[in-house]
Image (tube, rainbow, N blue to C red):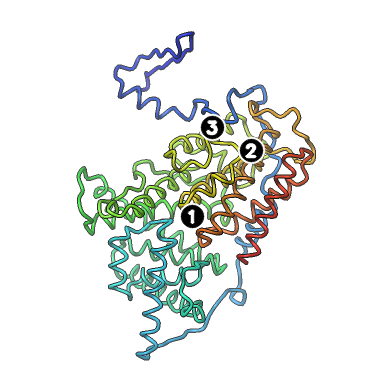
């Protein structure tokens, strides 16, 4: 394959292809592996002017991003942590109360967060955990739901919701610590650590959250040799326990890796990506036969596969340190060719989505409110939210200060700060529309920190000398602030 060559040329009759490759299958393989270097159709980057070889990093990070990092990286003392008293000790009627709450929190998880991010194979684990409510994973999930912003918790459980969640957190912590010392590692340990880590982050107990993410990542890697052979079997049927565990491990693997990478940036401040984070043979999440029978669950797993894909744009076996260091905020300038590559990864992701998941006809253009409103699947909205958030995080690093240009000479054919400013405007407008629909359809997965980051960018765009961008930013900011007001 190192000797493969492929030449594309255009004449009056269309495209001509000349290659030393011997089979059509090899041509397809070659195109798939190099597609990131081809200019995407209808993108803001048809033909790049490569005379500008470096771009100045104008914003190492937005003000709101910096604030989040300061808060998140702060080692909080015990008096600042959110704690709740122990309730419902061992009396029988109190035990029944907590068990009923735990089962409801489990049901709520699989209906809401566990449906949008289906890291557990639901047909197996929902039944299994309901039948084993004293399981450490059941306790950890209940703690997460109780402390999270999920709005599906029934009114009768609301008065003592946080207190019960704290009981479940303490249960899960004790059980998982015992399991790590006494038992062989398994996928339930990873899931428990993952749920506890997210719970600690919600409680701003960031040091503990960091420790639990690190432990989850180490154990997930240890389990690779156990579960990967099961996933690589050629034929599967039904919903065998070992297959459900292996597939859940794979889905958790990507989520834990995503959190570990973010810990590297936000908490550790590392200036490079650890090679241990690079894995290219795990395969993306796959729908199991027992999940395919439910059309909604089938689609939810397919959508999570795309969530993994978009996160994988930033970390792969061909990881680009530039993207990592841009997010870290440690670069003063960046090669325009690196920005091209990072953008091509995102355009490739968009092209790889089924058409019904698109909210526009092109990968980077202003969205029509009517089309966003017609999208009835909140998980599709969530996926598109990630797409525009990641674009926003990249292009805000490069955009020219809005008050310094009226964009009269701006061109989407040229990689520069004015082009980045236009893309930021498109992303802010898209996110305002998506946030509004998510707030109506599934506010539990809105992720308010992204709303705040987008508000920061919109606030800057309000200073634009371009009337079109300025007016859009003002409308978008009003929309986003109303959403924050309703959720805080």
Tell us which disc is closer to us: 2 or 3: 2
| Residue 79 image label | none
Q: Residues within 10 Å of mark 3 (few under 14, many from 20)?
A: some
Q: Are marks 2 and 1 in contact (CB under 8 Å)?
A: no
- Residue 359 x/y as whole percent: 52, 42
**Secondary-structure class at tag 1:** helix
- Residue 346 x/y as whole percent: 51, 38
Q: Earlier in the sequence, mark 1 or mark 3?
A: 1
Q: Residues within 10 Å of mark 1 (few under 14, many from 20)?
A: some
Above or below 411: residue 59: below
**Secondary-structure class at tag 3:** helix
Q: Quadrant of the C terminus?
A: bottom right
392 or 330: which is nearer to us?
Answer: 392
Q: Which residue is mark 1?
A: 259
Q: Which residue is mark 2?
A: 423
The quarter holding residue 249 reads bottom left
- Residue 225 x/y as whole percent: 28, 50
Above or below 272: residue 129: below
Q: Quadrant of the N terminus?
A: top left
The quarter holding residue 66 reads bottom right
Residue 154 vs residue 221: left or right? Answer: right
**Secondary-structure class at tag 2:** helix
Residue 435 vs residue 156: left or right? Answer: right
Q: Which residue is mark 3?
A: 341
Tell us which disc is closer to us: 2 or 1: 2
Q: CA distance from mark 1 to mark 3?
A: 23 Å
> Which residue is painted at 37% across and 18% down in the image?
3
The quarter holding residue 391 reads top right
> Which residue is painted at 43% across and 65% down in the image?
195
Q: CA distance from mark 2 to mark 3?
A: 16 Å
> Which residue is painted at 46% across and 43% down in the image?
357
Q: Earlier in the sequence, mark 2 or mark 1?
A: 1
């Amino acid at each position: 394959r190192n000797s493969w060559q492929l030449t594309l040329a255009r004449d009056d009759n269309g495209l001509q292809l000349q290659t030393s490759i011997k089979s059509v299958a090899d041509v397809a393989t070659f195109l798939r592996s190099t597609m990131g270097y081809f200019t995407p159709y209808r993108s803001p980057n048809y033909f790049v002017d490569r005379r500008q070889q470096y771009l100045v990093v104008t914003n190492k990070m937005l003000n709101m991003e910096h604030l989040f990092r300061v808060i998140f990286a702060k080692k909080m003392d015990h008096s600042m942590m959110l704690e709740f008293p122990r309730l419902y000790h061992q009396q029988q009627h109190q035990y029944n109360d907590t068990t009923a709450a735990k089962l409801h929190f489990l049901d709520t998880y699989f209906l809401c967060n566990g449906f949008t991010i289906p890291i557990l194979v639901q047909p197996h684990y929902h039944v299994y955990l309901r039948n084993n409510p004293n399981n450490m994973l059941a306790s950890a999930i209940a703690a997460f739901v109780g402390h999270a912003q999920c709005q599906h918790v029934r009114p009768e459980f609301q008065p003592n919701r946080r207190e019960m969640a704290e009981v479940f957190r303490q249960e899960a912590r004790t059980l998982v610590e015992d399991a790590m010392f006494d038992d062989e590692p398994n996928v339930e340990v990873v899931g428990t650590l993952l749920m506890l880590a997210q719970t600690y982050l919600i409680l701003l107990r960031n040091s503990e959250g960091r420790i639990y993410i690190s432990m989850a990542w180490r154990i997930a890697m240890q389990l690779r040799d156990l579960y990967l052979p099961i996933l690589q079997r050629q034929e599967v049927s039904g919903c065998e326990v070992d297959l459900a565990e292996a597939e859940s491990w794979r889905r958790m693997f990507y989520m834990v890796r995503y959190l570990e990478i973010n810990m590297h940036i936000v908490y550790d401040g590392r200036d490079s990506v650890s090679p241990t984070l690079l894995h290219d043979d795990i395969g993306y999440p796959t729908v199991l036969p027992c999940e395919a029978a439910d059309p909604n669950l089938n689609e939810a797993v397919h959508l999570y596969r795309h969530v993994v894909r978009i996160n994988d744009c930033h970390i792969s076996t061909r990881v680009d340190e530039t993207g990592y260091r841009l997010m870290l905020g440690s670069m003063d300038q960046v090669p325009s060719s690196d920005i091209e590559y990072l953008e091509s990864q995102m355009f490739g992701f968009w092209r790889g989505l089924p058409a019904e998941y698109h909210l526009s006809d092109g990968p980077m253009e202003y969205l029509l409110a009517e089309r966003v409103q017609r999208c009835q699947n909140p998980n599709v909205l969530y996926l598109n939210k990630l797409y525009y958030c990641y674009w926003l995080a990249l292009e805000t690093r490069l955009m020219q200060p809005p008050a310094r240009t009226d964009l009269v000479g701006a061109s989407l054919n040229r990689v520069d700060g004015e082009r980045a400013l236009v893309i930021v405007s498109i992303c802010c407008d898209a996110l305002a529309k998506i946030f509004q629909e998510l707030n109506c359809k599934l506010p539990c997965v809105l992720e308010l920190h992204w709303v705040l980051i987008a508000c920061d960018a919109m606030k800057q765009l309000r200073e634009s000398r371009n009337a079109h961008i300025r007016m859009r930013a003002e409308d978008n900011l009003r929309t986003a602030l109303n959403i924050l007001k309703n959720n805080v």
